[in-house]
Image (tube, helix red, strand yellow):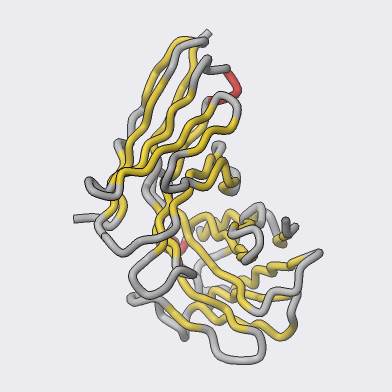
Amino acid sequence: RKEVEQDPGPFNVPEGATVAFNCTYSNSASQSFFWYRQDCRKEPKLLMSVYSSGNEDGRFTAQLNRASQYISLLIRDSKLSDSATYLCVVNGRRSNYQLIWGAGTKLIIKP
Amino acid sequence: GAVVSQHPSRVICKSGTSVKIECRSLDFQATTMFWYRQFPKQSLMLMATSNEGSKATYEQGVEKDKFLINHASLTLSTLTVTSAHPEDSSFYICSVRTLIPNEQFFGPGTRLTVL
């Protein structure tokens, strides 16, 4: 089983729709969780950290479910510019410094 | 945040040659830098952790004699792919991590193609 698992997609979604991604992780001791966004042939960029109580940043909402060991990302009112690959990242077993990356979920927003 | 640059952005080389990739932290003194590799449609894989003034820590399965890392200063780490082969063709990305905020900042990546 992979340490961080994501549905690779692609998710084809019409503009304006709401889309949700889930990510599961295997290390129950993980403390740090992130969503990164990666555009084609570019480096990843932090979208948002995920906090225990859940957090929101504009159209983006992230939630953490420790009991089931998954995190989610919700995008409301999707824009064409949201098309990208979304990477789930969790700190690893060795330390909080080590990050384990999911393979990403590809999102395509269609006009 | 931290600004990270990489050079070159793209390199094409012949099999058997060595390629050096530079990673610079422009506004942050990084005692630690990270080197990742990403194959198409796959996740980022940590190759090694580069430590300023000491030896790099390599992940399991990464050959330290093939991927030479030098972190001579707080702002520069280099990755040298020695005797490159076509299977080494990949997207190589470096990063630094800040504690406050708890975030990792990436360089723009180097796309290596070995013919």
- Residue A30 in the image: state x and y as whole percent: 35, 61
Q: Nearer the viewer, residue A69 or B29?
A: A69
Q: Nearer the viewer, residue B17 or A90?
A: A90
Relative to B17, does residue A64 appear above or below in the rendering? above
- Residue at x-position 47% and y-position 46%: A50
Extreme-front residue of the structure: A53
Asked which quadrant contains residue B79, the reply is bottom right
- Residue at x-position 61% and y-position 63%: B95
How many numbered marks does the figure carry? 0
**Residue B102 seen in the figure:** yes
Relative to B65, does residue A85 appear above or below in the rendering? above
Extreme-right residue of the structure: B27
Asked which quadrant contains residue A82, the reply is top right
Relative to B109, does residue B36 appear above or below in the rendering? below
- Residue A58 in the image: state x and y as whole percent: 60, 27
Locate the N terminus of chain B by quadrant.
bottom right
- Residue B113 in the image: state x and y as whole percent: 54, 56
In the displayed structure image, the side of residue B51 where residue B64 appears, left or right? left
**Residue A5 seen in the figure:** no
- Residue B32 in the image: state x and y as whole percent: 61, 76
